[in-house]
Image (cartoon, helix red, strand yellow):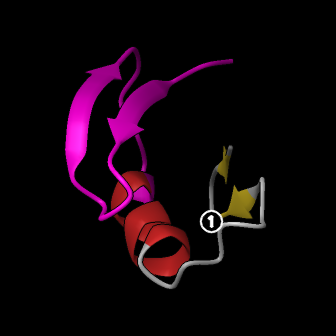
Amino acid sequence: MLDHVSVFSKSGLVLWSRTMAKLKGDPVDDLVKNVLLEERGGTNVATTEWYTLR
């Protein structure tokens, strides 16, 4: 199920965002902090406590 869609710049700036369901926690911030800003760009999947982000 698709709960949230965001479009980011390489620096982590959110260009567009749409939420289809209420999210537990803040997985978008976790993705920006832990994957995009650390430049782990070779990874296609990031997993948080509740979500799998692609």
Q: Is residue 40 above or below residue 24?
A: below
Give the left or right position of residue 42, taking residue 18 as reference.
Answer: right
Q: Is residue 43 above or below residue 5?
A: below
Q: Position of residue 42 (x, y in %)?
A: 77, 67
The residue tagged 1 is: 48
Q: Is residue 31 magenta?
A: no
Q: Which residues are magenta?
A: 1-27
Give the left or right position of residue 26, taking residue 49 as reference.
Answer: left
Q: Secondary structure at mark 1?
A: loop
Residue 2 placement: quadrant = top right
Give the left or right position of residue 50, taking residue 7 as reference.
Answer: right
Q: Is residue 7 magenta?
A: yes
Q: Position of residue 1 (x, y in %)?
A: 69, 18
Q: Nearer the viewer, residue 14 or 5?
A: 14
Residue 34 in view, yes or no:
yes
Q: Position of residue 54 (x, y in %)?
A: 68, 43
